């Protein structure tokens, strides 16, 4: 098994579905990028720069099961034919943030399978995200995958 890891910032939109009001469909995308974390005398500085390559895409369904908790399943596409399927481990968490116009959330996802490069893959992905009042999403992923 070899390790494949990634860190990307996805942006997109969530849309309510169904009549109950507790389910959202989310669609986001992220360009290829370089993320740099530098620690110095002034503390931490993080930068995100474009990198050559295509976009990654996420499509998911989020079901709220409590005031701040949710379950999520979905797929992540990394180029033509290379996809991961994921689901939450336990439940995700979403609550108000210090910014009154956005909520802040997090989830841990288990890789449930994949296609292309990710056939037989296992792994874990963390999602740390913000959602605004119009359901605009900014989602930061860090994934550590084991690929045959």
Image: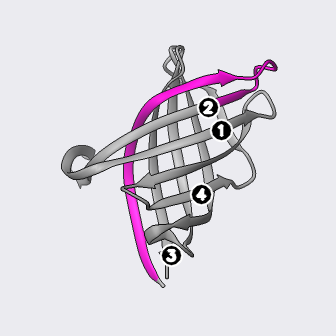
Name the residue nearer the viewer: 98 or 141. Answer: 141
Q: Nearer the viewer, mark 4 or mark 3?
A: 4
Q: Quadrant of residue 86?
A: bottom right
- Magenta-colored span: 2-24
User: Between disc 4 and disc 2, whose residue precedes?
Assistant: 2
Q: What SS does tag 1 mark?
A: strand
The residue identified by callout 3 is: 146
Work out how far the residue at label 1 is from the one at label 4, CA to CA, in angstroms: 12 Å
Q: Residue at x 44, y 62 (%)?
A: 82
Note whether 47 is above or below 25 in the view shown: below
Tags 2 and 1 touching, CB below 8 Å: yes
**Residue 17, image x and y in percent?**
69, 24
Tags 1 and 3 touching, CB below 8 Å: no
Note whether 42 is above or below 64 in the view shown: below
The residue identified by callout 2 is: 25
Q: Which mark is residue 35?
A: none
Q: Residue at x 61, y 46 (%)?
A: 107
Note whether 139 is above or below 98 in the view shown: below
9 inside magenta stretch: yes
**Residue 45, image x and y in percent?**
25, 44
Work out how far the residue at label 3 is from the one at label 2, CA to CA, in angstroms: 28 Å
User: Between disc 2 and disc 1, whose residue precedes?
Assistant: 2
In the visual, does 98 lie left or right of 71?
left
User: How busy is the neighbourhood of tag 4: few (under 14 within 10 Å), some, or many (20 plus)?
Assistant: many
Work out how far the residue at label 4 is from the one at label 2, CA to CA, in angstroms: 15 Å
User: Between disc 4 and disc 3, whose residue precedes?
Assistant: 4
């Amino acid at each position: 098994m070899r390790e494949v890891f990634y860190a990307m910032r996805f942006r997109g939109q969530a849309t309510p579905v169904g009549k109950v009001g507790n389910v959202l469909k989310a669609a986001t995308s992220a360009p290829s990028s370089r993320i740099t974390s530098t620690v110095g005398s002034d503390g931490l500085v993080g930068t995100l720069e474009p990198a050559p390559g295509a976009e990654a895409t996420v499509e998911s369904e989020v079901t709220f099961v409590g005031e701040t908790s949710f379950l999520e399943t979905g797929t992540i596409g990394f180029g033509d034919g290379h996809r991961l399927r994921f689901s939450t481990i336990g439940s995700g968490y979403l609550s108000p943030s210090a910014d009154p116009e956005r909520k802040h959330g997090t989830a841990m996802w288990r890789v449930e399978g994949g296609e292309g490069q990710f056939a037989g893959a296992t792994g874990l992905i963390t999602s740390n995200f913000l959602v605004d009042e119009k359901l605009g999403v900014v989602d930061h992923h860090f994934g550590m995958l084991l690929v045959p």
